[in-house]
Amino acid sequence: MAGGQSPDQMHNFYHIADLVIVPSQVEEAFCMVAVEAMAAGKVVLASKKGGIGEFVLDGITGYHLAEPMSSDSMINDIQPCAC
């Protein structure tokens, strides 16, 4: 969890990341983190809550988390994303 970061620092995070996980628990209308990660060419693993489920399409533009707050479930969800 990176917390609040500057745009330059986020660029650095996206550059070194292999996978960006977005386990949102609330219905977000739009998730900039997921969009920025996709624009940086990174694999996105996200919950289906709110607008994220509209553009992170499982197996096409990213992957969905089955249970966003379960570490065991998250481990299983990460395996298909392995490059």
Image: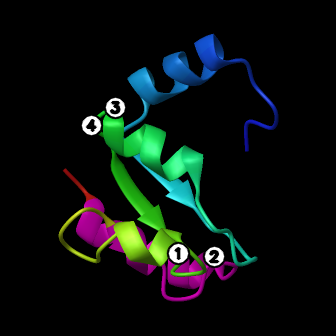
Q: What residue span does the magenta drawing correspond to?
A: 63-81
Residue 6, given in percent of the width and then of the height, sits at 72, 18
Of 11 and 17, nearer the camera is 11
Which residue sits furthest right?
Answer: 4
- Where does label 3 land, which residue? 40
- Where does label 2 land, which residue? 71
Report, in whole angstroms, how far the alpha carbon at label 1 lies from the one at label 3.
Answer: 22 Å
Report, in whole angstroms, how far the alpha carbon at label 2 lies from the one at label 4.
Answer: 25 Å
Report, in whole angstroms, how far the alpha carbon at label 3 lies from the one at label 4.
Answer: 4 Å
Q: Residues within 10 Å of mark 1 (few under 14, many from 20)?
A: some
Say if mark 1 contacts mark 2, CB within 8 Å.
yes
Looking at marks 1 and 3 on the same chain, the residue that comes earlier in the sequence is marked by: 3
Residue 43, given in percent of the width and then of the height, sits at 32, 51
Which residue does the image show at 36% across and 67% down from the upper left?
A: 55
Relative to 34, say whether 29 is above or below.
Answer: below
Report, in whole angstroms, how far the alpha carbon at label 1 lies from the one at label 2.
Answer: 5 Å
What's under tag 4, amino acid-wise?
Answer: Gly
- Where does label 4 land, which residue? 41
Task: Kindly identify which numbered label has been placed on residue 74.
Answer: 1
Please tell me whether mark 3 sits on a helix, a strand or a loop. loop
Relative to 28, say whether 32 is above or below.
Answer: above
Please tell me whether mark 1 sits on a helix, a strand or a loop. helix
Looking at marks 1 and 4 on the same chain, the residue that comes earlier in the sequence is marked by: 4
Please tell me whether mark 4 sits on a helix, a strand or a loop. loop
Say if mark 1 contacts mark 4, CB within 8 Å.
no
Residue 27, given in percent of the width and then of the height, sits at 70, 78
Please tell me whether mark 2 sits on a helix, a strand or a loop. helix
Q: Is residue 38 left or right of residue 67?
A: left
